[in-house]
């Protein structure tokens, strides 16, 4: 099958879910460059993951084992630990230092997991055909995010001082075990494979609930500010979008070129969405701020007595 067909189909589910989880950061949207970088790193770790799994599997050592025992070894001792361990290292070593909300762990964990799952999708499509994406798209791709969520949620809490490293370690161990169980049931290639779907549904419900909890626990929740200016005549505050002072009717043209944060009164640079001093998010994006004073007409002269 042509790569022009495989790649768009393989990456479409991952890009959709990446957009979905990115949009959950409603109080402090993460920089897109960091999200994309984490996604790409998740793609790249499929190479060391494949090498490690090939070295650990040692096919000759499994040849005399019963099928069920062989599936257990592969799922719980190789695939789960290797893949979840590498995804965790990507987030821990690359973007963890930027965490300022509990939800950041889930968002970046999802980005790494989706990059990994997208490359896996392409590999399986090249091996088995395009139709495999009909199963991997809605099931396996999301499953990678659910697995990662078990360590990503406590890692996000740890980033803001709300959890211990022990909690992160427990979450990572649980992720490895759940990943192993998911693959184990699939390896049976019989009716127990239904339990993989059940694990996915329960895990997705848990992850959705943890996302809501992380949003509610955000230290940035409710920290909103407006862009304001100081009237040059009476020094009262006015919204940066106003043309005239509502107290003395003076034109605000010159003042609008130098807006300030409505929370802490710090100067605001052009195009800023967050205050550099207090970290509050401005309630709406006003676009690029004027670089020169606006040409406003002078107030009309009062009528002659």
Image (cartoon, grey):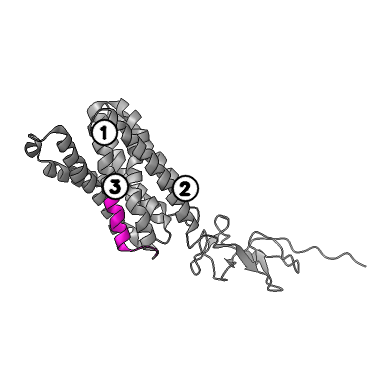
Mark 3 vs mark 2: which is more N-terminal? 2
On screen, residue 134 versus residue 71, left or right, reads: right
Identify which residue, 232 or 83, lies in the foreground.
Answer: 83
What residue appears at the point 48 percent right and 63 percent down from the top-left corner? 219
What residue appears at the point 15 percent right and 44 percent down from the top-left corner? 51
What residue appears at the point 40 percent right and 44 percent down from the top-left corner? 18
Instruction: Tell me which corner region of the image, top left, top right, bottom left or bottom right, holds residue 203.
Output: top left
Point out the stretch of residues depicted in magenta.
162-174
Task: Name the residue carrying label 1.
Answer: 186
What residue appears at the point 32 percent right and 35 percent down from the top-left corner? 195
Tell me the number on the disc at residue 42.
3
Asked if the stretch drawn in magenta spans residue 233, the answer is: no
Image quarter hosting the N terminus: top left
On screen, residue 262 versus residue 33, left or right, reads: right
Q: Where is residue 249 in the image (x, y as percent from the top left)?
A: 75, 66
Q: Position of residue 176 (x, y in %)?
A: 26, 48
Residue contact at pointers 3 and 2, CB within 8 angstroms = no
Identify the element where label 3 is drawn.
Answer: helix
């Amino acid at each position: 099958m042509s790569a022009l067909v495989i790649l768009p189909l393989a990456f479409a589910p991952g890009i959709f879910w990446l957009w979905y989880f990115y949009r959950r950061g409603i109080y402090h949207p993460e920089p897109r460059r960091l999200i994309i970088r984490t996604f790409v790193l998740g793609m790249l770790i499929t190479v060391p993951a494949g090498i490690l799994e090939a070295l650990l599997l040692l096919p000759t050592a499994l040849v005399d084992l019963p099928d069920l025992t062989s599936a257990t070894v592969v799922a719980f001792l190789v695939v789960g630990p290797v893949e979840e361990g590498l995804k965790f290292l990507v987030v821990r070593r690359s973007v963890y230092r930027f965490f300022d909300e509990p939800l950041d762990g889930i968002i970046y964990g999802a980005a790494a997991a989706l990059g990994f799952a997208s490359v896996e999708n392409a590999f399986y499509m090249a091996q088995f055909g395009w139709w495999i994406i009909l199963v991997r798209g809605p099931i396996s791709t999301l499953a990678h995010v659910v697995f990662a969520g078990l360590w990503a949620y406590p890692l996000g809490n740890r980033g803001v001082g709300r959890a211990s490293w022990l909690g992160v370690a427990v979450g990572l161990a649980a992720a490895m075990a759940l990943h192993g169980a998911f693959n184990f049931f699939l390896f049976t290639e019989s009716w127990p494979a239904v339990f993989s779907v059940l694990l996915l549904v329960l895990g997705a419900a848990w992850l959705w609930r943890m996302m809501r909890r992380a949003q509610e626990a955000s230290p940035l929740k409710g920290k909103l500010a407006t862009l304001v200016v100081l009237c040059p005549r009476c020094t009262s505050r006015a919204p940066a979008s106003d043309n005239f002072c509502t107290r003395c009717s003076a034109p605000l043209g010159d003042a609008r070129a130098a807006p300030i944060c409505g929370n802490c009164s710090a100067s605001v640079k052009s195009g800023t969405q967050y205050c550099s001093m207090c970290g509050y998010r401005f309630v709406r994006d006003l676009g690029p701020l004027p670089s020169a004073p606006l040409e406003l007409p002078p107030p009309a002269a009062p009528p002659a007595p």
